[in-house]
Amino acid sequence: MRGFGLLLAAIAAVPAMPVNLAHAQTTIGDATAMGLTGSCDKLILGKQKLADSCSGKLLNMSYPDGRVGFYFILDDGLIVTFSGMDAPNPTPDTDVVKVDKVIMGVKGKPKDPEVVAATGTCTYGNPYKGESTVSCDGTMSNGQRFSARFTSDGKPPT
């Protein structure tokens, strides 16, 4: 995963990125990154409940081929990513991603992520219109369910 190392650098830079409403997205290689701050209300992978160790930061990466990733960043350096292909927008201010993999990586070890095939969806609202929510639900190929919910604090993306 060539972009994973770049992603870790982007995660480290999220709090330092200046807020510029006209250019709140950052380009990393061929991808576009956007950071949100807020609260991780739920993060469950099988029997693991991880919301208490979420850092309050969420990174969204969009790739030229239509792939989208939501990166939940935990305080201990673990990064849980729900990745899939962009789907048609149900409304002008909401979008859907068809999740096809869950990726678990550790900051500082970008070449060793655990990738699990999955089926599910992530839905999200427009973060430029105040508080918004990212919700992901589905099943991993090992039969375990995943569920995540991040609520932004209403500040514009960085």
Image (cartoon, rainbow, N blue to C red):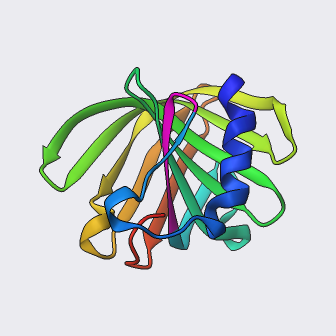
User: In the rendered image, is residue 23 in sight?
Assistant: yes
The relative height of residue 55 versus residue 13 in the rendered view (above or below) is below
Q: Position of residue 33 (x, y in %)?
A: 50, 46
The one nearer the camera, 14 or 149, is: 14
With 118 as the anchor, is 93 left or right in this view? left
Q: Position of residue 57 (x, y in %)?
A: 60, 66
**Region of the chain picked out in magenta, as a range:** 29-36
The one nearer the camera, 43 or 75, is: 75
With 108 as the anchor, is 134 left or right in this view? left
Q: Is residue 86 magenta?
A: no
The relative height of residue 103 versus residue 21 in the rendered view (above or below) is above
Look at 38% across and 71% down and name the residue there.
156
Q: Position of residue 129 (x, y in %)?
A: 24, 71
Q: Is residue 35 magenta?
A: yes
The relative height of residue 11 versus residue 29 in the rendered view (above or below) is below
Look at 27% across and 31% down and name the residue there.
87
